[in-house]
Amino acid sequence: MMKNVKIIGAGLAGSEAALQSARRGISVTLVEMRPQVPTAVHKTADCAELVCSNSLKSTKPESAAGMLKAELAALGSYLYQAALQTRVAAGGALAVDRDLFSQAITRQIDEHPLITLEHREASSVQEEARGFDALVLASGPLTSDALAQSLGELTGADHLAFYDAAAPIVMADSLDMDKLFSQSRYEDGAGDYLNAPFNKEEYESFIQELLAAERVIAKDFETKDLFQACQPIEEIARSGVDAPRFGPLKPVGLTDPRTGHRPWAALQLRAEDAHGGCFNLVGFQTNLTFPEQRRVFRMIPGLENAEFARYGVMHRNTFINAPKLLDASLRLRAADASCDAPVFVAGQLSGTEGYVEAIRSGLHAALSVVALLQGKDAVPVPEDMAWGALLGYATNPETVNYQPSHVNFGIMRPFEQRIRNKRDRYAAYAARGAQALEGYVAQLREEGLLEGE
């Protein structure tokens, strides 16, 4: 008997999941609320519409984004192939004609005999799961209020974010350790945090530029607007020049070893992963544009040449607390007891950032669903693959203060023997990932999950 899967959301993740599932003989009902229910950013009713940049980032094999594209190519991604066919000149990046790209995907979905596209709003996870063998939620960061409320009832409201304000993350090897020092507050010697000390002049110049910087959302946010009352650093500064140094930049309990005194102000940086490959700017949630973050935050002592693994973001961005709710197959554990079918979550709703990451998560969800419906164990994704590293980060129950991320070398397993040259290190990551990908593909073929590729 043919299996039936329902997918909510025809964005990047949902479209890829639908095409991959149908390719393997599964009947798919794909539900998209547009155009019946519009959003503030979408312009069409097409599937896989790109609403921000038209760039899918670097194609260089030795980049994290390039590694992820190699995985999509090896796994037969429909959306990646469409991107290649609709690409426009963009140097070393893969950029597309956004209209031709989404039209190509829409055409494939419309023409596939096993996919039925329904334009309507889905408002209940439990209702949508009824009568199907599996449900994939891929409704994205602009999930409707009704569906978000239903999801919150299943998972607990504290596991669902709306306005999120995330702090930037910088690569460890781009920091000037001659200016930074390791110390935890009120402790002697090296501590768990890196500290960037400001003198009075540096601090006042920084605050002046912070207040003048261009913002993504041109409004002054109030505490009630934000998830968990998470105020952007520029909003704190707007309440008073000294407010940040009595808040996130407070220097109390710290001693700069270069001067023997407490700094005028200090930014603390916390390791983002166990390997110390990248650091989070503690308390620096922000609404600044990406170029302004580069310019202003590089005024911080020790961050003059900082490379950003992730910029700070602040926008309507519905996502779940993936480490607490999802397993490595992207299955929503909280839904098992109350839904008639297993529920999977893909795309930005699952807590990943980026176009290519969304495509890859849709493909992963489809493989997980197919394996489950065929009575097979899902093939684990090696941690040395780009997707494996991101999946491990996003579904690790020990991850705290979770915020969405994209693939980057900062979350990848370091080498036992450190490779100091950055170019050589990135090339080594790519070579190791390619080897892991080869083994992963072989396992999928052995399980019959890549038949007919």
Image: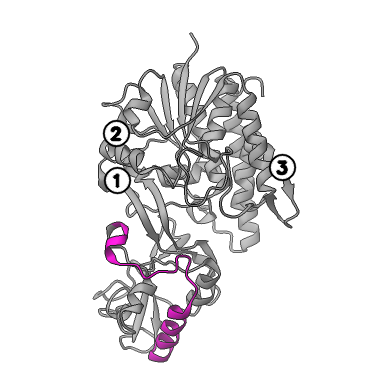
Q: Are marks 1 and 3 in contact (CB under 8 Å)?
A: no
The amino acid type found where label 2 is placed reads: Ala
Q: Which mark is residue 334?
A: 2
Is 311 rendered above or below residue 183?
above
For the C terminus, which image quadrant? top right
Observer-nearest of 373 and 393: 373
Q: Which mark is residue 159?
A: 1
Q: Position of residue 375 (x, y in %)?
A: 44, 16
* Real-space Cα separation, disc 3 to disc 2, in angstroms: 38 Å
Q: Are marks 2 and 1 in contact (CB under 8 Å)?
A: yes
Mark 1 falls on what kind of element?
helix
Q: Residue furthest top?
A: 1
Q: Quadrant of residue 24?
A: top right
Q: Position of residue 99 (x, y in %)?
A: 66, 45
Residue 235 counted in the magenta span? no
Q: Quadrant of residue 264?
A: bottom left
- Segment colored magenta: 199-227
Is 187 rendered above or below residue 28?
below
The amino acid type found where label 3 is placed reads: Leu
